[in-house]
Image (spheres, rainbow, N blue to C red):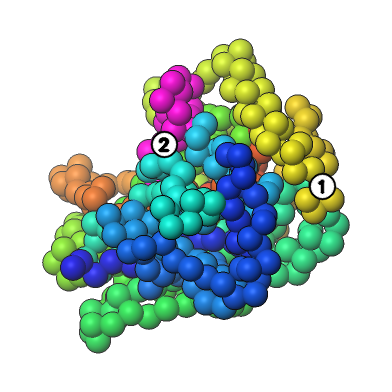
Amino acid sequence: MMDSSLALGRLEVSTRTTVDGGLCGRENEKNFRDGAQPQPNGCAPLSHQVAGHKYGVNQVGILQHPDGTILKQLQPPPRGPREMHFYNMVYAEDCSDPYLLDLQQYLPKYYGPWTSPGAPNDLYLKLEDVSLKFNKPCIMDVKMGQQSYDPYASQEKREQQISKYPLMEEIGFLVLGMRIYQVTSDSYKTYNQQYGRNLVKDTIKDGLAKFFHNGNGLRKDAVLGSIQKVRKILEWFEGQRQLHFYASSLLFVYEGSPGLGKVMLPEIEVPKKLLSPGSREEPEESSNNNNVREIGSCTHGHMAAAFSQDLSNTYMLHSGVGGQQPYSDTLPEIHSGKKHNGALQEWFSLEKPNTNIVSTQLVWEKNSHEPEVEPSGNEVEVRMIDFAHVFPSKTRDEGYIYGLKSLLYILQQMLRD
């Protein structure tokens, strides 16, 4: 059997959930808190999960299904129903919204809710295993955005999340875990969330570079492949004004086996123009950015209103949970314009203060005789995961965009070194 971590996603759950009339119930939570952890027949705990709650006392974690998919147990309301409604909306058979259809390529495939015949009240999300096709998958989970709490979080929750990683607002992302195949020892190196929390401005680039180091050297082909994938996700975010994502992650996977994943690249020139995480310029128009499409306000409004109403109906049934308020068409004030042109841009500008900045394009200055060689798209995967805190909006998700630009800048700097 292929050595696979089956490492899609993270499960932020501390209580077991059940189904009650098609919604997420709580009748068996006490048994779960007491340590009861029955597994569906044929399923096993995910052995190479890189982040989040893993299988153990009072925790189910991510499960591996015999058919090669993974099972993520639905979280308690309102998080679990909210994530399920997000997947149902994006993958609806009658979905016609161009932005949601485009979004599908950046998510794991969704096969719907799943229950075991032996425990029909336990509900799981059945998802694609992004790492299944890799022989020696190298996996990294990165939480994106300038804040990991949503607009409805209590002050206590906000302070708790900020205290976990005070630099989230400035850096724009947090490394939650990594697993890297080492060719020299035929083994894996792993780094947990505490490692990511210890990374500061002066160490974030080298800390992130460990994910691309296989024991022999830096896998620049994997870095380049990751840049290309992240740029596509950035283009999607810069074109949409319908959704805001909080505490959501990017899952990176590349092939660690020698000869299978490595693509021989020609000598690469240093990028002359770099993307700045502090830039808030709009994307370039058609000829320079053909992958970004604009949609009329009617389409935006229809999708956002439908999503808001769908979540509202579910949320109101659980409005007593956690003391939060029901959804409405108008979200609480979201402070998304934080430090977009502040200390982080200064920090990234130290090495090359005269560097020309562009908002969405990574421009490679190559000699005309150099062949165009790119890493195969099959050798690097970058997918968005974890959608328990997705909310309708009428503005761009500047916090997530800031994180993407910050991450891209650091990846580009790895290629410069």
Quarter in which the N terminus is drawn: bottom left
Image point (28%, 82%), residue name: 187
Is residue 98 found inside the magenta-colored segment of the image? yes
The kind of residue on which mark 1 rests is: Gly
The kind of residue on which mark 2 rests is: Gln
Whether residue 354 is visible to the viewer of this picture, yes or no, is no
Q: Nearer the viewer, residue 142 or 172?
A: 142
Quarter in which the C terminus is drawn: bottom left
Stretch of the chain drawn in magenta = 90-108
Q: Nearer the viewer, residue 20 or 241?
A: 20
Question: Does the CB distance between marks 1 and 2 fall below 8 Å?
Answer: no
Across and down, in percent, residue 262 comes to 20, 63
Is residue 156 found inside the magenta-colored segment of the image? no
SS at circle 2: helix
Q: Which residue is mark 1?
A: 320
- Kindly identify which numbered label has been placed on residue 178: none
Q: From the viewer's perspective, is residue 160 above or below residue 83?
A: below
Image quadrant assignment for residue 226: bottom left
Across and down, in percent, residue 109 comes to 37, 43
Q: Residues within 10 Å of mark 1 (few under 14, many from 20)?
A: few
Q: Nearer the viewer, residue 401 or 318?
A: 318
